Amino acid sequence: MDTNKHESQDRSRVMLRFIHHLKVERPPEAETAAEARERLREKFPRAALRRMTHLGMLLGSTLEGASLSADDALVYASVFAETRALEDYLGSFPAASPVLFQTSIHPGGIQQVLIGRQQPIARLWPLAGRARLVEQALLTALMEPAARVGLAGGEERGTWLLEHNRASGRAFAFGAVLTNEAAGAMGSIRFDRALNGATLADDPCPSLPAWVDTLAEKETLTWRGGGGVWSLVWR
């Protein structure tokens, strides 16, 4: 038996990243953007803060201390993005608010953070979706060639767009840094491809809110999807 060939095939079947930074924001349900601005004001440059959306502030809080560099990449996941900012602007009609208009067309939440902190990165992968968004974001992070990959996502809490299933029922955000280094890691994310092209029935993929709750509680998670098995474990 060719041992080296077997080991090479096994490595190509497994994709693995280690978690070295993690923070989750799950603010009170009734928190407004103005209240978040007051709560988080020490974390942002004053000039940037006054134009940031609720989601942008939550994301910035979760990535504080992540120490991303110009060689790193970042994967960003959101189903609805700046929904509340858009709702507030539309709600200002017929006397449309210039301030709310500026907020509604401001760069997306993760871009607000990077621009405000003048943080260059090598690549930004913004992803949107529903049923398997978490899976798509994780796969993108695992396949990214950069040694360090930021992984972030979140939502704003909607109001009237909830009736049309076009908004999140709560605000939340998470920010993590994934690397190839096991030393000092708090956990890991792993994908094992099915052996010999075997077909596996997909389990339901965790929704973005469920994923954030799992991270916040540091719960172990395993599910089948995308032709393999996903696992989130903690040390």
Image: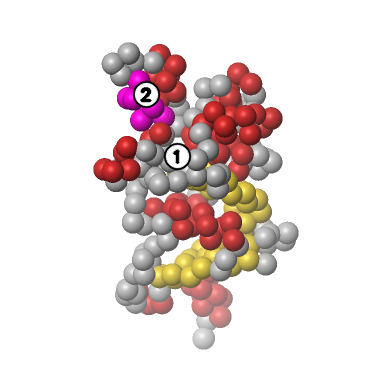
- The amino acid type found where label 2 is placed reads Tyr
Residue 76 is situated, as x and y percent measured from the top left of the image, at 47, 43
Q: How many marks?
A: 2
Q: Main secondary structure of the magenta part?
A: helix
| Helix, strand or loop status at disc 2 | helix
Residue 132 placement: quadrant? bottom left
Q: Residues within 10 Å of mark 2 (few under 14, many from 20)?
A: some
For residue 53: magenta?
Answer: no
In this orientation, does residue 14 appear?
no
Alpha-carbon distance for marks 1 and 2?
A: 14 Å
Residue 134 falls left or right of residue 190: left
Camera-nearest residue between 226 and 210: 210
Q: Is residue 80 above or below residue 195?
A: above
Q: Which residues are magenta?
A: 85-92
Q: What residue appears at the point 45 percent right and 27 percent down from the top-left corner? A: 107
Q: What residue appears at the point 35 percent right and 42 percent down from the top-left corner? A: 167
Q: For residue 156, which numbered disc appears in the image? A: 1
Camera-nearest residue between 205 and 15: 205
